[in-house]
Amino acid sequence: MPQSDLHSLVSEVANDLSGVANLLSLPIALSHLKQDFSGLSHKLSYVAKDDPRFNELDFLIQQTVSLLDFLGVESKDADENVLALLDGIIEVARAETALFAGGDDGEADIAERRENMTNELNALAIYALDALGIDVTLMEDAPVFDDDVSSELDYLSSLIQGNGESSDSSTHTQMLTQKRVKETKDAEAQTKFEPTTRVKSHLLEHLMSYSEELVQIRNTLADFAEKQESLALTELSNKLKTVSDGMLNDLLKTQMRPVGNLLSKYRRIVRDLSKELDKKVDVEIIGENIELDSNVIDAINEPLTHLVRNALDHGFETQEARAVSGKSMVGRLLIHAYNEAGKVVINICDDGKGIDRKKVLSKAVSNGLVTLENRHQLTDKEILELIFHPGLSTSENVSALSGRGVGMDAVKRKVEDIKGTIDIHSEKGVGTEISLIFPLTMATLKVALFDIGDVTYAIPSSDIANIVAISNQEDNSSVRFDSGHTLLFQNNNVIPLVEPHEYLGELAEQHAFRRTYQQGTRHSVIVFTHRGQQWGLPVDHVRAFLDIVIKPLDRSMNGKDVFAGAAVLGNGDLALVINLKKVIQFAQAYH
């Protein structure tokens, strides 16, 4: 091929790569993507015949086409994971093409470039393995491929050849397939795989519903056995509890997914937004193997995306501004997922300009959220939390990149809808950290049951720090009622108490705890921690700890949002699950 034609063809490849890169930011069918990559492969094969520097790039695109062919069998639309993986491949291909188009011989950094190609193919091939039904999470202790990547991908390609198509390529891949089958029969690595079975999701949902009913039946039997004082029924109840716990735990595992499936897409989002905003930002993701209920993962996609976009758009300064303030020209965004106290925490941290509290407070005053008289009484933490109020934003313009007119109140609402909480820390000029805290599963919850008056309530056991028995006859503890505040003094500790009427309103008698305590009645105090401060809830008595199935409450029954939901107990009683964060808010407002 004449050199001028070769240069022209290389330019066409570069343009096609840019075109495909733009398509990956839009909803698109896998069949269309396959056509675009096939066109790239066709042109690259011609280029590689005359310029061997393109051989490895040609191989990269060929294998991508093969894997897309397989993925297109069962899925018509490309999901975000596929788009992110293909975007990585396109970026590598564009860098390689630009290098050769500039006249480089390709020898510099060749090992690193080959490793980049291998890594991108690995990632896409792992996705294909998952589509084949092989659980790749079982291979964490060994390399995903025990041969060179080209052989592995040829093997995958052989699995997706068309019916009866005969060609030199198909004959070659069939030979590789036969070789692979023979090797895997004898290989010790085969023992690392466990058999898997595909099950329709709606069947798992039905099983989960049945298991939730079983939990209620188990609790009913336990109550009945206790009332009858029957050893035989008690033994049967204990056996049923063991079996139902095991079944429920295994069912919950089927609904767990690594959060990395969701978090990985933010690498592409950050890279694209950085270019669009002309900011340099590196993103680091930690804890991709942390598992979370798939329903929770689906629900947090939108609020997480909003927070990441918001950090890029409003959190990070321009390169010039960072240089003036003595910061690195490249900003750092950290997304960190980890387990803590039976929950999953996802932190979004940036080293940007932080939140200006004075600006937030000024905006809150102008919006009527805070009066001029009490603005000086707010703590720094309370000022930061004002951004979660509807309509409060420090941004002058509605941005198409981040908020799009939707504020942080919508993020908080979506998080709380799935029984999660949100917390924020920020320092002007240093950065912002937002923490999203979620339950491991939305199916069941272990709680402490307690009574206040004639009503039964519940609090998640993971939120409880301690339970203290008190009375006015105790020597090591005492309760003082001073200027509207109720304080528990115990072992040199002072714990503010929130009386029931302060957060339950009409459901609790005014100052009933104060009266009964002074009469010598014994009570229990449920101690919990909120932002480093211990608080206590005085209750009549704690009944038991057990697993319950939480159901949402209608708004008409939960106007103040003090309840996170309700559960039907074994004896038919209704237990109201208390939202401790709301309790603190009501207590602070009451005083």
Image: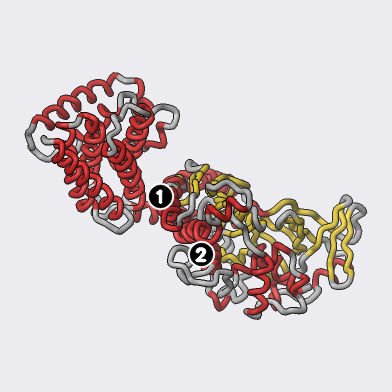
Q: Amino acid at mark 2?
A: Lys
Closest to the observer, 266 or 465: 266
What residue is drawn where x is 34% and y is 38%? Answer: 120
Please name the residue that numbered disc 2 is placed on.
414
Expressed as whole percent of the image width and height from the top left, the position of residue 453 reads: 73, 70
Q: Quadrant of the C terminus?
A: bottom right
Q: Amino acid at mark 1?
A: Arg
Disc 2 crowd rating (10 Å Cα; few below 14, some 14-19, many 20+) is some
Q: Is residue 190 above or below residue 374?
A: above
Residue 39 as seen in the image, left or right of residue 339:
left
Expressed as whole percent of the image width and height from the top left, the position of residue 3 reads: 15, 36
Expressed as whole percent of the image width and height from the top left, the position of residue 307 reads: 51, 59
What residue is drawn where x is 48% and y is 61%? Answer: 306
Secondary element at image label 1? helix
Labels 1, 2: front one: 1
Residue 538 location, quadrant = bottom right
Q: Evaluate whether residue 566 shows in this view.
A: yes
- Sooner in the amino-acid sequence: mark 1 or mark 2: 1
Q: Is residue 15 above or below residue 530?
A: above
Secondary element at image label 2? helix
Residue 494 as seen in the image, left or right of residue 567:
right
Tell me how far mark 1 sits from mark 2, CA to CA. Answer: 24 Å
Answer yes or no: do the residues labelled 1 and 2 have beta carbons within 8 Å?
A: no
Expressed as whole percent of the image width and height from the top left, the position of residue 444 reads: 53, 55
Which dot marks residue 268? 1
